[in-house]
Image (cartoon, rainbow, N blue to C red):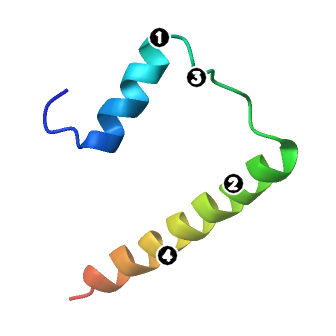
Amino acid sequence: MKNLDKSEKEILSEYDKGLLKSTAPSKAKLAKFKAAATATFRKEKKSASRNHRF
């Protein structure tokens, strides 16, 4: 892992020491992430179809 800034190094160090733990997102957060991903996919799909017109 090259080019980590001070903050990233600190987070990695704390994780390696076991001070940080992974948690599962709540159902509300999952719904929010899913909506954002769907919107991004639609936006990319529209953009791709506009770019491929001849």
Kind of residue sitting beneath label 4:
Lys
Give residue 36's position: percent from left, percent from top.
63, 64
Say whether disc 2 or disc 3 marks the residue closer to the N-terminus: 3
Left or right: 10 with respect to 36?
A: left
Q: Which mark is residue 17?
A: 1
Say whether disc 2 or disc 1 marks the residue closer to the N-terminus: 1
* Residue at the disc numbered 3: 20
State the CA–CA distance, disc 2 to disc 1. Answer: 32 Å
| Residue at image coords 43%, 13% | 16
* Residue at the disc numbered 4: 43
Dot 2 surroundings within 10 Å: few (below 14), some, or many (20 or more)? few
The vertical placement of 31 against 5, above or below, is below
SS under mark 3: loop
Q: Point out the image quarter for the N terminus.
A: top left
Q: Within the image, what quadrant is residue 2 found in?
A: top left
| Residue at image coords 47%, 10% | 17
* Residue at the disc numbered 2: 34
Tell us which disc is closer to us: 2 or 1: 1
Left or right: 37 with respect to 13?
A: right
Kind of residue sitting beneath label 3:
Leu
